[in-house]
Image (cartoon, coloured by chain):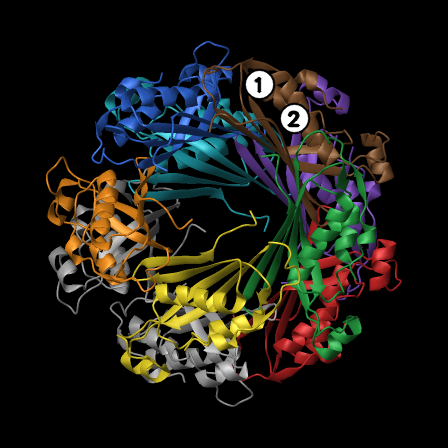
Chain colours: A cyan, C orange, E blue, F purple, G yellow, H red, I brown, J green
Amino acid sequence: MPRPEILETFPNPYAGRDYEIRMQCPEFTSLCPLGGVESDAEELAQLQGGAPDFATMHINYVPGEKCVELKSLKLYLWSFRNDGIFYERAVNRILDDLVAVVEPRWMEVVGDFNIRGGIKSVITAHVGARTDG
Amino acid sequence: MPRPEILETFPNPYAGRDYEIRMQCPEFTSLCPLGGVESDAEELAQLQGGAPDFATMHINYVPGEKCVELKSLKLYLWSFRNDGIFYERAVNRILDDLVAVVEPRWMEVVGDFNIRGGIKSVITAHVGARTDG
Amino acid sequence: MPRPEILETFPNPYAGRDYEIRMQCPEFTSLCPLGGVESDAEELAQLQGGAPDFATMHINYVPGEKCVELKSLKLYLWSFRNDGIFYERAVNRILDDLVAVVEPRWMEVVGDFNIRGGIKSVITAHVGARTDG
Amino acid sequence: MPRPEILETFPNPYAGRDYEIRMQCPEFTSLCPLGGVESDAEELAQLQGGAPDFATMHINYVPGEKCVELKSLKLYLWSFRNDGIFYERAVNRILDDLVAVVEPRWMEVVGDFNIRGGIKSVITAHVGARTDG
Amino acid sequence: MPRPEILETFPNPYAGRDYEIRMQCPEFTSLCPLGGVESDAEELAQLQGGAPDFATMHINYVPGEKCVELKSLKLYLWSFRNDGIFYERAVNRILDDLVAVVEPRWMEVVGDFNIRGGIKSVITAHVGARTDG
Amino acid sequence: MPRPEILETFPNPYAGRDYEIRMQCPEFTSLCPLGGVESDAEELAQLQGGAPDFATMHINYVPGEKCVELKSLKLYLWSFRNDGIFYERAVNRILDDLVAVVEPRWMEVVGDFNIRGGIKSVITAHVGARTDG
Amino acid sequence: MPRPEILETFPNPYAGRDYEIRMQCPEFTSLCPLGGVESDAEELAQLQGGAPDFATMHINYVPGEKCVELKSLKLYLWSFRNDGIFYERAVNRILDDLVAVVEPRWMEVVGDFNIRGGIKSVITAHVGARTDG
Amino acid sequence: MPRPEILETFPNPYAGRDYEIRMQCPEFTSLCPLGGVESDAEELAQLQGGAPDFATMHINYVPGEKCVELKSLKLYLWSFRNDGIFYERAVNRILDDLVAVVEPRWMEVVGDFNIRGGIKSVITAHVGARTDG
Amino acid sequence: MPRPEILETFPNPYAGRDYEIRMQCPEFTSLCPLGGVESDAEELAQLQGGAPDFATMHINYVPGEKCVELKSLKLYLWSFRNDGIFYERAVNRILDDLVAVVEPRWMEVVGDFNIRGGIKSVITAHVGARTDG
Amino acid sequence: MPRPEILETFPNPYAGRDYEIRMQCPEFTSLCPLGGVESDAEELAQLQGGAPDFATMHINYVPGEKCVELKSLKLYLWSFRNDGIFYERAVNRILDDLVAVVEPRWMEVVGDFNIRGGIKSVITAHVGARTDG
C-alpha cells in the first residue's frame, strides 16, 4: 500500500530562484490489480494473477519552499511494490502525494511502463504552470 | 475486418485533470489491398499479392470521462491482421473508431510503417486541441 | 499452413567456392497455438486466443549446387501468417523445409521472437558443419 | 533526366481532415554535374567525373484533395539516377514537381546528402504553411 | 520464496537435434537479504532495509528430451519477488532448479544486476558442455 | 572547499554579438555531506560515510564583456573534489560563483548526477534571459 | 558493365610483413537483372523493372606484393552502377576481379545489401587463408 | 592563416524561395594559440605547445542571391590547419568571413570542439533572423 | 592511499562449481602522480598539478572458497581517491590486493581510463587461467 | 616529418606479468602525399592538393621492460600533422618506430581512417605473438 507518510522534505536552499529538479527512478514496480480485490505476495504465485508491472518513473519539479528528500522518495516508491494499482492511478496518485508534501511551484510525473500484451504505455500528468522558462 | 465493437473503456480515475496517455503498439500488421477486392489468407499465398504490411502504431490522447481498456485495444488492433487496407485509411480509421468510443479531449494516431519499395512512410492524424500544455 | 512447395531455387553461380549467404527477415509473424486446435482469423478476435507472435527470422547458409530464390522465400515465410505453431517447432520446421529444397553445405536458422510475458526468446538450429572457415 | 510525368496520385480518403504524411527514401542517387555538359554512364567511367551522389530524401506533406501514389514516387526518384544535378537544384526541383502534381496544403522536401570532401550537406525547402498544428 | 514446483515442461519437438534456446527476462526482482532474517513487505518500508534488487536474467540451454514451458518459467521467476537472496545464490539456485526439472544437455544462467553502490554485477554459471558447435 | 577566487576571465573577442558558449564537464565529483560536519579525505575511508558523488556539469552562457578561462574553470570545478555538498546547493553555488565573475548576459548550469539509491537526478538553474534567439 | 581493367595497384610498401587492409564502400549500387536482357537507364523508367539495388561493399585483404589503388577501386565499383547483376554474382565477381589484379595473400568480399521484399541479405566470399593471426 | 579570399560562390538557383542549407564539417583542426606569438609546425614539436584542436564545424544558412561553393569552403576551412586561434574567435571569424562573401538571409556557425582538460565546448553564433519558418 | 585492509570476503555459496562474477565500477577516480612527491587535496588547487584521473574499473573473477563483499570493495576503490598513482600501477595493484584477499581461481582487472591529452587508455591484467570454459 | 626521437619510455612497473595496454588516439591527422614531392602548409591552400587525412590510431601492446610515456606518444603522433604519407606507410611506420623504442612482447597498430571518395579504410599491423592469453 502506498505510504505517503514516509515522504520527507528539506528546506529549499535557493528558494528565491526558480530552478528545476528532474529525478528518474528506473526501478518502479507494482502489481496489476485483480478485479478490485487486494493482491498480496501469497496470492501472486498461487492465482497466477496480479502480474508484476515495471516502470521508469520520472518526477520533475520546480521547488517552492521545500525539496523532497531522496531517500524518503525511494522508500515511498518501494511501498508500491506489492500494491495492485492501474497505470493511470499510480501516476496521478504519486503526483498528488508529492504535491501535498512538497508544495512545488510546478510538478510533473511521467510513468514509462514496460510493454504488456505488445503495447507500451507512457502516462504524463502535471500540476501548476512553468514560470522559470 | 476491423472490429471497433471490441473496444472497451473504463471510467477515467482522474477525470478532473488534463493528463496524457501515450501507447506504442509495435506489432500492427495488415495486408496491402488488392485492387479493391477483399483479400484473405487463402489468396495471400496463391496470388502472391495482398502483401503484409507492418507498422508501429502510436495512440496518444488526453482522456475525458473514459480511458480505453488495454486488452480490448490489443484485440481491436489484431482485427486488422487479415484486412486489406491503405496506410492513410488505416491511421484515420483507427483514429475515428477510438474517438467514437473513448470521446477524448485530444487524440493523435501515428502509423510508422516499415520500408516498402525503398520508401518508409509515417502518417499522423489527430482530433481536438491540446489544453493540458 | 506452411507451404514449402512454394520454395524455388536457382543454380549457385559460384558452386566451386564455399561462401556464405545471410538473410534477415524482420517481418515473420505466426499465431500462438491454441491447445492443439487450429486457429483461424475468425477465432482470433472472438476467442481472444491464438495471439499473434512476431519474430525476426535469420537464415544463414553455405550453398551447394542451389541458392534459394528470394521472392519464393518471402512467400514461404508469409505462409506461416495464420498458422498456430510453437517457437521451437517454427524454427526447426523452416530449417527442415529449406534444407530439403536447397541442399546446402551448412544452414542455420535463428528465430528472434518479440517479448511475451516479459520474456524474450531466441531459438537457433543448424544442419551441417562449416567448412569455409 | 527527372520525369515528373511518371508521378501519379489517388484521391485523399480523408480530405476533410488536416493530417501529415512523412516519407523517407534512403536510396536516392544522382550524378554530380560536369560543367554543364550532360553526363551519361559511358562518360562516368572514362572521364572519372560526374561522380555519383547519394542522399536520403524526406518528403513530408499535408495532403489536400490528392495523395501521391508510392510506386510512382519511387519511379520518379529513380529517374534522377543518371542525371547530373546540384544538391540545391535537386531538392527544389523535387518539391516543385510534387507540388504541381499533388497540390498539397503544405509540403517539405529534405535532402540529406552523404559526406563529400569531408562535408555533409542537408538542404530543406517547403511550400505552404502548416495549419494542422 | 522460490517455488521450483511451479516449473513445467513439454516434450522437445526436435529432440534428435542439438539446438539452442536463449531466453531473456528483463523483469527479475528480489530483495537484498537482511542479516539472515527473512524480510517481508511489511518490514520493507518500516526497517528501510531489504532493499529491492533488479536484474535481467538470461537462461540459455540446449534441450534434451524436455523444454521449459514459458508461462511456468515466468511464474517461477516471479516467486523470487519478496525473497531475500544474494546475487550469487540467486543465479546458481535458478540454474539448479531448472536443470533438475528440464534435464538439458547444456544450460547457462546469467544474472545481469542493476548498479548498486556504484557497482554493476553480472554472474554467469553453467552446467554441461556445448556439443552443438 | 569551492574556491571561486581561482576563476579567471578574458575579454570577449566578439562582445558586440550575442552568441552562446556551451561547456560540458563530465568529470565533476564531490562528497555527499555528513550531517553538517565537514568531511575530509581522512574521514572518508574511516567513517565509511561522505560517499563520493559524480556528475556531468553543463555550463552554458551568452557572454557579456568577459569569457571564462577554460583552465581556471577546470581548477575551480576540481576544488569541489573533497567538499561535502548537496546536489541543489552545488548547482546553484556554481551558477552564483560564475555569474559573479563572468557577468554573462545569460547563464545556465545543469548538474546531471549519477544514479544513487536507484534514482538519477538532474538539476537546472539559470540567471538572465535569452536575447540571442 | 563491370570494368576490371580500371583497377590499378601500387607496390606494397611493407611486403615483408603480413598486415590487413579493410575497406568499406557504403555507396555501391547496381540494378536488379531483368530476365537476362540487359537493362539501361532508358528502360529503367519505362519498364518499371531493373530496380536499383544498394549495398555496402566490404573489401578486406592481406596484401602480397601489391596494394589496390583507392581511386581506381572507387571507379571500378562505380562501373556496376547501370549493370543488371544478382547479389551472389556481384560479390564473387568483385572478389575474382580484385584477386586477379592484386594477388593478395588473403581476400574477403562482403556485400551487405539493403532490405528488399522485407528481407536483408549479406553475402561473404573469400580466397586464401589467414596467416597473419 | 585563414584565407577568406579562397571562398567562392555560385548564384542561388532558387533565390525566390527561402530554404535552408546545413553543412557539417567534422574535420576542422587548428592550433591552440601560444601567448600571442605565432606558432608553426616546427615549434609545435619542439616547444610542446600550440597543441592541435579538433572540431566539427556546422555551417547553416538561408541563402540570398548566392550559395557557397563546397570545394572552396573545404579549402577555406583547411587554411586554419596551422593557425593558432581561440575557439570563440574561430567560430565568429568563420561566420564573419562567410557572411561577407555569401550575403545570406540568415547564417549560423556552430563549433563543436573535442574535449580538452576534461571539458567539451560548443560555440554558436549567428547573423540575421529566420524568415522561412 | 589504497587500503587493502578494508577488503572483506564471504564464503562462496557454490564453491563446488566454477562460475564467473563480473563487476563494473564506473566511478573510480585517483590523482595523476606529481614527480614522486605525494599530492594531497591542498596542493591540488594551488599547484595546478596532480590532476584527477577517472576510470571505469572492471573486476572479473572465478571465485574459489571466497567472494569479495561488495560494500568493502566499494570502500577499497574509494581509498584511491586522493592517491597519486600511474594507470599501470593502479590496475596491477588492485589485482594484487584482491588476489591476496579473495584467492580466486582466475581474476582479471581492466582499467578503462578517460581520455587525457587526446589519448584514451585501457589496461588489462589477470592472474590464473580460465577452467570454467 | 615523423620524429621518433621524441618518444620516451619509463620502466614497466610490473614487468614480471604479461598484461595489455590499449591506447586510442582519435585525433591523428596527416596529409595525403602529392606525387612524391613534399607538401607544406603553403602549398596546401594554393595547390588544392595534399588534402588532410584524419584517423583514429589504436596502439595496443604487451610491455616488456618498458612502457611508452603518454605525453611523448602524443607529441610523436602530432609530428605527422604536416607530413604527406600513405595510409599503409603511416601505420607500419608507427609500428616500427614504437617497437624500436618500447621493445614490447607484442604490439599492434590499427589506423582507422575517415571516409575518402566514399571509401573507409582500416589498416592493422602487428609484431610479436600474444603469450598472455
Residue marked by disc 2: I95
Please state the horizontal and vertical placement of residue H69, each as a whole percent of the image.
62, 79
| Mark 2 belongs to chain | I
Left/right placement of residue I36 relative to residue A10 reads right
Identify the residue at image location x=23%, y=34%: E16
| Rendered position, F96 above or below E84 | below
Among the two numbered marks 1 and 2 on one chain, the one whose residue lies closer to the N terminus: 1
| Amino acid beneath label 2 | Leu
Residue marked by disc 1: I69
* Category of crowding for the residue at label 2, using alpha-carbon neighbours closer than 10 angstroms: few (below 14), some (14–19), many (at least 20): many
Identify the residue at image location x=59%, y=48%: A132
Q: Quadrant of residue E7?
A: top left
Q: Secondary structure at mark 2?
A: helix
Q: Secondary structure at mark 1?
A: loop
Question: Is residue H12 at least partly visible in the picture?
Answer: yes
Residues tagged by mark 1 and mark 2 found on one chain of the structure? yes
Q: Nearer the viewer, residue C28 or G19?
A: G19
| Rendered position, A87 above or below J44 | above
Question: Is residue A80 at least partly visible in the picture?
Answer: no
Please state the horizontal and vertical placement of residue I99, each as a whole percent of the image.
63, 21
Identify the residue at image location x=11%, y=42%: C38
Q: Quadrant of residue G62?
A: bottom right
| Rendered position, J110 above or below H104 | above
Please state the horizontal and vertical placement of residue A107, each as a whole percent of the image.
51, 40
Contact flag, marks 1 and 2 (Cβ < 8 Å): no
| Amino acid beneath label 1 | Glu
Identify the residue at image location x=71%, y=31%: I90
